[in-house]
Amino acid sequence: MRLLTREALLSFRRAPLLSALSITTIGFSLFTLGLFGLVAINLRQALQGLEERVEIVAFVLRGTPAETITLASQDIAAFPEVQDVGFVTEPQALERARTELVEFRDAYRDLQVNPLPASIEVRLKEGFRDAATVELVAERLRGFTFVDDVRFGREWVQRLDQLRNVTGIVGVVIGMAFAAVAVVIIGVTIRLTLLQRAREISIMRLVGATNWFIRGPFLLEGALKGLLGGLFSLLLCYAGYLLFRDRTGGPFSDLIFFRPDQMALLIVFGVLLGLAGSLVSVGRHLRHV
């Protein structure tokens, strides 16, 4: 292992400019991927904020006994999808309308009879806020005999669901594209190193070195380049994050950066890309050297 490490490190000394160019290119490839990752996690956070506003409202028939509503609320709270349940009385509904619907404040003030019904408001747990689950819970609420109507903004929930799905698909496609670019770049640099050391490899074969013994330093070299490229991309991502957050401010002041496990994942991804690029390049071109 010490010999493999020494040979891999020697390749950096033999071609420092090529190695630096390789690491920089890998770093910028992963930087682009990392930037998209930052956009994705912040978009996911924004979507989570929207998801928290998903609410199912069951309007109660007038004259329903308070005990019936209390027992039903306890049953609803026991649903595995439900986070919390709230009850809004008729006077509370009217007061809320006067406060939130400013344009109708005068109309509500002049009313002799309160037209707004009482309601049960249901909020769902994280992971259960997709359109199908919301519809399922709403259907259960319709099963209560005292429920007059159930509303949850079907179109808004479906659009939120579609946005979540599109974000996931775009993320996978772009991530795979940049990963492929990084693998090609690493493969090209390893191939150049192979050609540069063709004479040395021929001598190693003459003295009986196996293919895996020859491949070892190149694979380790690719992994090291991927590691350094990953660290470099992480620094670039953090610099870009700070610059964008501090320059824009306002609604972007709450942007988040990668968690430690996500930073480690980006670095590990760089190492894996380095290994993949080396493995492909060495396997394809070693037999021609």
Image (cartoon, rainbow, N blue to C red):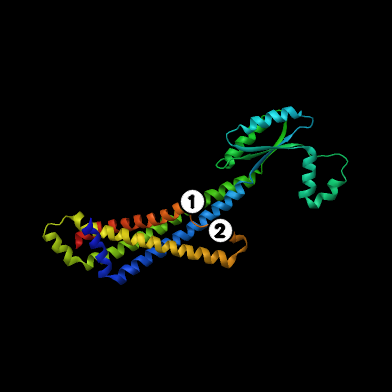
Circles 1 and 2: CB distance less than 8 Å? Answer: no
Q: Quadrant of the N terminus?
A: bottom left
Q: How many marks?
A: 2
- Based on the displayed image, in which of its 4 quarters is residue 195 positioned? bottom left
Question: Mark 1 or mark 2: which is in front?
Answer: 2
Q: Return the residue at label 1.
A: 169
Residue most toward the bottom?
17
Mark 1 nearby-residue class (10 Å; few <14, some 14–19, many ≥20): few
Q: Return the residue at label 2.
A: 255
Residue most toward the front?
2
Q: What residue is shown at x 33% (from left), y 62% (from top)?
A: 225
Residue 153 placed where, x, y %?
66, 44
Residue type at numbered disc 2:
Leu
- Left-right relation of 74 to 26: right
Which numbered disc, 1 or 2, marks the residue that appears first in the sequence?
Answer: 1
Residue 208 placed where, x, y %?
12, 57
Residue 123 placed where, x, y %?
64, 40
